[in-house]
Each structure stands twice: as C-alpha cells, then as structure tokens.
Amino acid sequence: MENSSNPSHPSLRYLRAGAVGLLVASLAPIAMGASAQTAAGAPAKTVGLVNGEPISEDQVLAAAAADLRDLDARQPRNDRTMARDRLAIMHKALDTVAEGKMLALEAARLQTTPQQIIEAEITSNVVTPSEGDVVAVYEKNKAGIQAPRDQALVQLRQQMIDRSRNAYHDVLLRRLKRDYGFKSLLEPLRTEVTTAGYPSRGPANARVTIVEFSDFECPFCGGLFPTLKGIERTYPDTVRIVYRQFPLKNIHPFAQKAAEASLCAAEQSRFWEMHDSLFGFQEDLTIDSLKLRAMELKLDVAAFSTCLDSGKHAATILKDKEDAARLGVSGTPTLFVNGRILLGNQPAELRALIDDELARTR
C-alpha cells in the first residue's frame, strides 16, 4: 500500500505513535479463565476471543474508561456520531486487551517475556532515517509545510521513525491474531462512504458494496486489480464495486491525468473499459498513450482529447481526495466493504469480509 509523503496528509498527522506504548501498558496480568463475573454475579458479556478464551465487556470497558470519559466531556454531537465514536473506542480497547493476552501466550510459548518479544520484533527493527533522507522529504514537501525548517525536520524525523515502528507493530499483531485465533464479537466499525454518482459495476441492490479509493499508477492498486476481477466473478449477484479517485501526485506523476482520462471516458459511458486498460498497462500513462487508448477503445477521440487537455475533471478528482482525507484514507488502495475499512491488496481478508457481510445480511 502506498502513502502520501506530504506532512500535511492524514498519514503523517495521525500516526499511531503510541501504539507500542499501549501494547506495553496492556501487559498487566490478565485472567485467562472463564468470563468475568459482574457485581451481581451474572456472567459478563463476551466481546472477543483469544485462543478460545473470552474477553469480557467489563475488561474492555475498563481499558476504554479514559477515552470514554474524554468523549463524554466533549461538546455534544449528534447521536449517530457519538455512537460511532464510542464503538471505535471499544474496538481500540478490545485490541489493547487482546494484545496483552496474546503477548502473554506467546511469551509463555517461547519461554521469554512480552517486553523481549516487543524488543526483538518491533524496537530492534525500527529504521532511523538519515539526515539526508529527512531533508529529501522536507524539500519535496516544503511548499505545504508551515513550520520553520529546523522544527519541521525534527517532526519529520520522528514521524518517519513512528511509521517504521507502527509497520513492525502491525506485522506482529497480525501474526499474533492469526496464531491465537483472535475474534472480535463487537459490531463492526463502519464508515459512511458516498457512492451515488460514482462509477460502479455490479447490481445496484447488491448486499455488499465495495468502495475503492485508488490510483491508476500505484503498483499496489495494480496488484488489487485482478483480485477485484476475481471478486466480480465469484460474487456476480451480491457484490457491487464503486471506484473513487485518489491519485498520489507527489509520487506518481502520471496518476492525475490518468484519473482525468477515466472520467473523460466516462462521459462516453466507457469508464470501466478505460479503467481496465489503465490498470492493464500501468507502465505507460503518458498523455499520448491515454489518447491512443481512447482510439483503441473506439471513443470519440476528438472529444476525449478536448476533455483531457482542458483538465475539466480536476475539481471532481480533488473532491474525491478531500472526501478520502475526511474518511481517514492515507494511501492506496483503500477499500470500504459495507463501510468496513481494508487497507491494501489482501485477497483472503477481502473475501472473509465479504463472506461475513453476506452472513450478516441473510
């Protein structure tokens, strides 16, 4: 998955710098036996499983207590926003509790300590960028940086270190969740994503809608392309795919015009033909190549060229990127499966999400 390197981008402004801190904080002894009992003696609700052992709602509420207090102290908001924010906090707290349990199990298996696992698999692998690397990122993005240069360089360096740490943290947690059979029993966290008016294929009444934020020049998006083709073949009557633009212009110089080309083709009702052509031949996205593709697709080439040269769809693409930023999208490809976010090309995880959604809507 590719991320924007712009320091003003959500991927740099909202790094999970405290992820490992939360992991360490979750290492307090946790009972691995039967469900916790409420004060009244009734079994507490189970909201997750690790290695077949329950995680109780009471445990998660305890881990979430500070964040829930902060949420309640904020200015009142509409009920739907508040409910989603509370659910997001519960998911985060469930992960924290589960991480502690899984690390304890892994440490027992390896006859070591959770802290030593963190050191071996996260801390020791963190990449510290050179001064030259930091300066290069600054020079590439300085037009959008408001902080003084010296201050910005310090912040950028820390952000780059945090990115590396979070990447190794995520790898470890994915492995532990897989090895110890983590399962969340909370309602999935969903994000409302607008689909009306955007290119789509599949039934309009499909039980599962996948919204893809993508970049025609991104190699990871190119890798996702056959995955989604396979999804279309496997779920022809139950899945709809919606495409939204997210060209990363700072790292993909041809992505913007490729995105515009797809919308110029859409004016002639040929968006998906152009979409498939662009992902089929990502190595050549020059203006001349885009116009040649229009000819090969038997479009009205004169109208297509006028559209492409005018940049008339640039504002539409900018709106997609602004919407993506509000949704927390920081790189490509990013998918929303009935509002459930999935980052990158993960075929097995994508099919599992689809199957779970189909099971929920029977």
Image: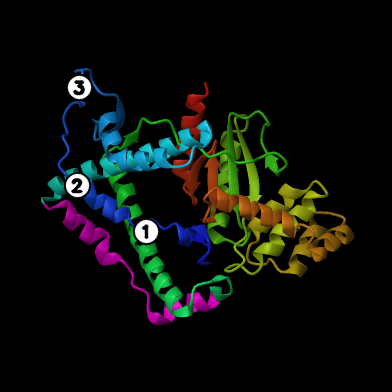
Relative image position of residue 141 (x, y in whole percent):
55, 73
Q: Nearer the viewer, residue 191 or 121?
A: 191
Neighbour tally class for label 3: few under 14, some 14-19, many 20 plus, Cα within 10 Å: few
Left or right relative to 362: residue 101 = left
Of mark 1 and mark 2, the one earlier in the sequence is 2
**Which residue is the site of mark 3?**
39
Label of residue 96 in the image: none
The range drawn in magenta is 112-140
Please indicate whether residue 301 sits to the left or right of residue 241 in the image: right
Kind of residue at badge 3: Ala
Q: Residue extending furthest bottom?
A: 132
Residue 27 is labelled as 2
Q: Are marks 3 and 1 in contact (CB under 8 Å)?
A: no
The residue located at (74%, 49%) in the rendering is: 271
290, above or below 230, in the image:
below
Q: Disc 1 to disc 2, how far (Cα)?
A: 20 Å
Dot 3 or dot 2: first in sequence order is: 2
